[in-house]
Image (cartoon, rainbow, N blue to C red):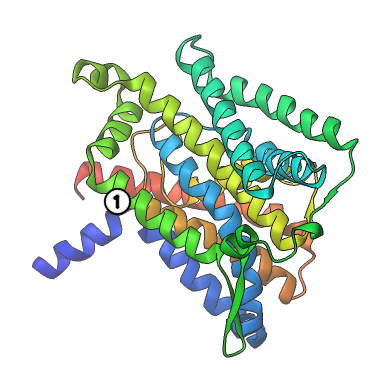
C-alpha cells in the first residue's frame, strides 16, 4: 500500500511526464545514431541549451505568478548590441558596458511590470509592444548589421561568463555553471521561501493573495525585471561565445521559452510552477532539435515536433490534474 502511494505521488507530480519523455528521447536518438551521445555532441548541445535555459528559469517564476513576457527574445538581441556598441565605440569599458546593458534591461522589465500592474493592461499586449520597441531599437542602433565583439580579447568578463575548459575531450563553458547556479537558487526560492509562496499565491488567486497581505503588484514587477535581466545576461553570454552581436538574435525565442516552461509542468494560467520541470523541458526541446538533425530529419520540421510535444504534454498534465483531484 505504501509503495503504491509513493508511485501515485510520483505519477501526480508535474515533472513525471517530462522526465519520461526526456528519457525516451535520449534512448531513441541514441539507438538510431550512436553519435548522439558522443562527448562532442553533448558539449555542443549544452553550449546553447544553457543560454536559452537561463531565460526559461526566470520565465517559470513569472508564469507561475500568472504573467508572461514576450519581449525576452528581443532583449536577447538588444542587450549585447548595446553593450558592444558602447565598448567598441570607446565610450566605456567592457565592465561598465555590461552593467549598463543589465540595468537598461531591468528598467525595461520594470516598465513592463508597471504597465501590467498599474495600467491593468494584459501582459501579452504590453510585452508584445515592448518586443517591437526593443527589437526596433537594436536594428536602429546597428543599421541592421551585426556588431563585432572580437576586440574583447581575453577580457576577464568574457572568461567569467563563457570561458571554456576541458575534462579530457569534453568541453565545458562557464555558462553551464551560471545555469546550474540559477536553477538551484530559483528552485529554492520557489519551493522553500516565503517569496515562493507569494509567487504561487499571486498566480493562483490574486485577490485572495492580497487579502492575505501579499503585495501582488510588487511581486509581479520584480519578476518582470528578473525576466528581462536574465534575457539580457543570456544574450550577452551568447554574443561572447559566437563573437557577434546580431540585432536579430533571439527572434522567436520567447515562444520556445514559453514552450519549455509549459512542457515542464508550469501552468500557463499561473498558480503552479516547477523549476525542475522547466529544466527537463529545456533539455527536451534542445535534445529534440539536436536529435532530429543527427538522424536526418530536416531541421525545418522542428516546429512540427515542438507543437506535437506541447499538445501531448498538455493533454498529459490535464489528465494527471483531473486524476489527482478525483483521487483515483
The answer to whether one can see residue 278 in this image is: yes
Identified at 55% across, 23% down, the residue is 112
> Would residue 1 be found to the left or right of residue 184 on screen?
left
Tag 1 residue? 188
What kind of element bears circle 1? helix
In the image, 11 versus 181, the foreground residue is 181
How crowded is the residue under tag 1: few (<14 C-alpha within 10 Å), some, or many (20+)? few
User: Image quarter for residue 302?
Assistant: bottom right
Residue 273 relative to residue 201: left or right? right
Question: In the picture provided, is 267 more to the left or to the right than 245?
Answer: left
Total numbered circles: 1
Kindly indicate the quadrant of the structure image that contains residue 228. top right
Q: Where is residue 150 in the image (x, y as percent from the top left)?
A: 80, 60
Tell me: residue 254, above or below residue 66: below
For the point 66% across and 85% down, the residue is 35
Classify the position of the N terminus by image quarter: bottom left
Q: Residue at x 69, y 46 (%)?
A: 93
Residue 125 location, x and y as percent?
Answer: 61, 20
Q: State which quadrant residue 17 falls in.
A: bottom left
Nearest to the observer: residue 3 or residue 84: 84
Q: Position of residue 32 (x, y in %)?
A: 65, 83
The extreme left residue here reads 1
* Residue 275, placed above or below residue 176: above
Outermost residue to the top: 119
Counting from the top left corner in percent of width and height, residue 92 is at 71, 41
Residue in the image at 36% along x and 57% along y: 184
The residue most toward the bottom is: 168
Amino acid at each position: 500500500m505504501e509503495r503504491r502511494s509513493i508511485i501515485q505521488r510520483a505519477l501526480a507530480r508535474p515533472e513525471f511526464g517530462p522526465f519520461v519523455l526526456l528519457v525516451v528521447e535520449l534512448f531513441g536518438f541514441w539507438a538510431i545514431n550512436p553519435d548522439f551521445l558522443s562527448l562532442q555532441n553533448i558539449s555542443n548541445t549544452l553550449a546553447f541549451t544553457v543560454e536559452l535555459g537561463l531565460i526559461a528559469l526566470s520565465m517559470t517564476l513569472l508564469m507561475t505568478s500568472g504573467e508572461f513576457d514576450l519581449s525576452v527574445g528581443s532583449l536577447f538581441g538588444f542587450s549585447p548590441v548595446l553593450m558592444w556598441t558602447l565598448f567598441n565605440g570607446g565610450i566605456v569599458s567592457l565592465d561598465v558596458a555590461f552593467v549598463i546593458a543589465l540595468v537598461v534591461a531591468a528598467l525595461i522589465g520594470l516598465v513592463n511590470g508597471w504597465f501590467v500592474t498599474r495600467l491593468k493592461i494584459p501582459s501579452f499586449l504590453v510585452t508584445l509592444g515592448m518586443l517591437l520597441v526593443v527589437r526596433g531599437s537594436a536594428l536602429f542602433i546597428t543599421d541592421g548589421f551585426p556588431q563585432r565583439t572580437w576586440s574583447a580579447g581575453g577580457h576577464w568578463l568574457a572568461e567569467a561568463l563563457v570561458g571554456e575548459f576541458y575534462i579530457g575531450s569534453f568541453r565545458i563553458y562557464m555558462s553551464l555553471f551560471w545555469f546550474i547556479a540559477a536553477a538551484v537558487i530559483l528552485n529554492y526560492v520557489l519551493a522553500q521561501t516565503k517569496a515562493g509562496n507569494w509567487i504561487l499565491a499571486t498566480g493562483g488567486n490574486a485577490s485572495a493573495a492580497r487579502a492575505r497581505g501579499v503585495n501582488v503588484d510588487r511581486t509581479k514587477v520584480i519578476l518582470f525585471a528578473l525576466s528581462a535581466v536574465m534575457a539580457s545576461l543570456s544574450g550577452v553570454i551568447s554574443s561572447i561565445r559566437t563573437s557577434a552581436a546580431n540585432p536579430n538574435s533571439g527572434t522567436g525565442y520567447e515562444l520556445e521559452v514559453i514552450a519549455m516552461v509549459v512542457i515542464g509542468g508550469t501552468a500557463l494560467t499561473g498558480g503552479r510552477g516547477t523549476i525542475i520541470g522547466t529544466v527537463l523541458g529545456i533539455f527536451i526541446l534542445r535534445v529534440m532539435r539536436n536529435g532530429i538533425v543527427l538522424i536526418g530529419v530536416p531541421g525545418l520540421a522542428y516546429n512540427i515536433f515542438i507543437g506535437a510535444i506541447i499538445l501531448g504534454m498538455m493533454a498529459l498534465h490535464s489528465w494527471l490534474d483531473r486524476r489527482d483531484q478525483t483521487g483515483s
